[in-house]
Image (cartoon, helix red, strand yellow):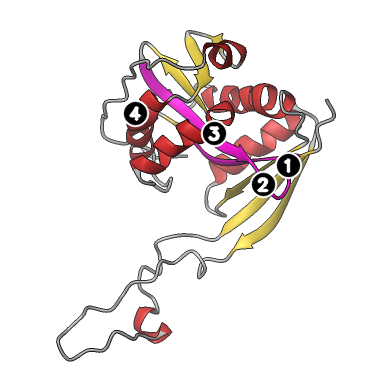
């Protein structure tokens, strides 16, 4: 479960958008409104991810591109004008029957409220069913027990299988740290130079494949 983060401004303002998309893929439950991601949400989404370690924080530009290119498969939860949850994902180009869920984030003050389950159910209805997709995939690190429980309960609730496979090793997830450049150093470096650099920075990532839905 993401740890408590510092208070951040996640208020959202609306930009003109595809009204049909917003209406067709929106739902309101228990004072929380879930709708497709918009360009105006990018800054608040980035701030939300920053407040939810251990999620990887990507650039604000990356989240803006998600809103621009994948609005129909990314969703945000709004409560009292604040972005309090989000799920990002896309249809896999090489497996057009599969939705890949990239990140799901719940604001620290909303964790334990069931919002994560509500967002996943929204994905099932408005991303999977509307696009006639049969599988959902995501990656979870072995130490993230809360996310593992969330997705296994999701599969049970929808009465579909949940299969787990190794995908990326911890070594594959370690960034390359360039050695410090000096006047007499060459531009070349070896694996020895970067070995153990940030060795604890990232766990392995296991692939969870959930399905198949038959719509």
Q: Which residue is mark 4?
A: 44
Q: Which residue is mark 2?
A: 93
The reply, left or right, for residue 13 in relation to residue 142 is left
Given this view, does label 4 or label 2 mark the residue nearer the observer?
A: 2
Residue extending furthest toward the right: 214
Give the main secondary structure of the magenta stretch: strand
Residue in the image at 59% along x and 22% along y: 118
The disc, 2 or 3, on the residue closer to the chain's N-terminal end is 3
The disc, 4 or 1, on the residue closer to the chain's N-terminal end is 4
Residue in the image at 61% along x and 35% along y: 150
Query: How packed is label 1: few (under 14 Cα within 10 Å), some, or many (20 or more)?
Result: some
Quick check: 33 above or below 99?
A: above
Image location (x, y in percent) of residue 173: 48, 64
Given this view, does label 4 or label 1 mark the residue nearer the observer?
A: 1
Residues under numbered marks 1 and 2 in contact, where contact means CB atoms less than 8 Å apart: yes
Q: Which residues are drawn in magenta?
A: 82-105
Image location (x, y in percent) of residue 125: 69, 22
Q: At numbered mark 2, what does the secondary structure look like: helix, strand or loop?
A: loop
Q: Quadrant of residue 90?
A: top right
Q: Quadrant of residue 153?
A: top right
The disc, 3 or 4, on the residue closer to the chain's N-terminal end is 4
Q: Which residue is mark 3?
A: 70
Distance Cα–Cα, label 4 vs label 1? 30 Å
Distance Cα–Cα, label 3 vs label 1? 14 Å
Q: At numbered mark 1, what does the secondary structure look like: helix, strand or loop?
A: loop
The answer to if 87 sits in the magenta stretch is yes
Q: Which residue is mark 1?
A: 96
Residues under numbered marks 4 and 1 in contact, where contact means CB atoms less than 8 Å apart: no
Distance Cα–Cα, label 4 vs label 2? 28 Å
């Amino acid at each position: 479960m993401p740890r408590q983060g510092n208070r951040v401004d996640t208020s959202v303002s609306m930009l003109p958008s595809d009204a049909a998309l917003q209406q067709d893929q929106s739902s309101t439950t228990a004072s929380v409104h879930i709708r497709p991601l918009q360009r105006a949400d990018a800054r608040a989404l980035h701030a939300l991810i920053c407040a939810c370690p251990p999620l990887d924080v990507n650039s604000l530009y990356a989240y803006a591109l998600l809103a621009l290119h994948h609005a129909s498969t990314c969703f945000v939860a709004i409560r009292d004008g604040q972005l309090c949850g989000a799920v990002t994902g896309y249809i896999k180009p090489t497996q057009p029957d599969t939705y890949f869920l990239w990140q799901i984030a719940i604001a620290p003050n909303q964790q334990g409220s069931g919002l994560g389950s509500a967002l996943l159910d929204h994905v099932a209805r408005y991303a999977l069913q509307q696009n006639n997709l049969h599988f959902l995939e995501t990656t979870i690190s072995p130490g993230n027990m809360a996310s593992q429980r969330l997705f296994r309960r999701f599969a049970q609730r929808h009465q579909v299988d949940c299969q787990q496979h190794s995908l990326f090793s911890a070594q594959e997830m370690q960034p390359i740290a360039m050695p410090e450049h000096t006047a007499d150093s060459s531009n070349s470096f070896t694996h020895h130079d970067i070995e153990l650099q940030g060795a604890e920075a990232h766990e392995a990532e296991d692939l969870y494949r959930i399905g198949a839905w038959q719509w």
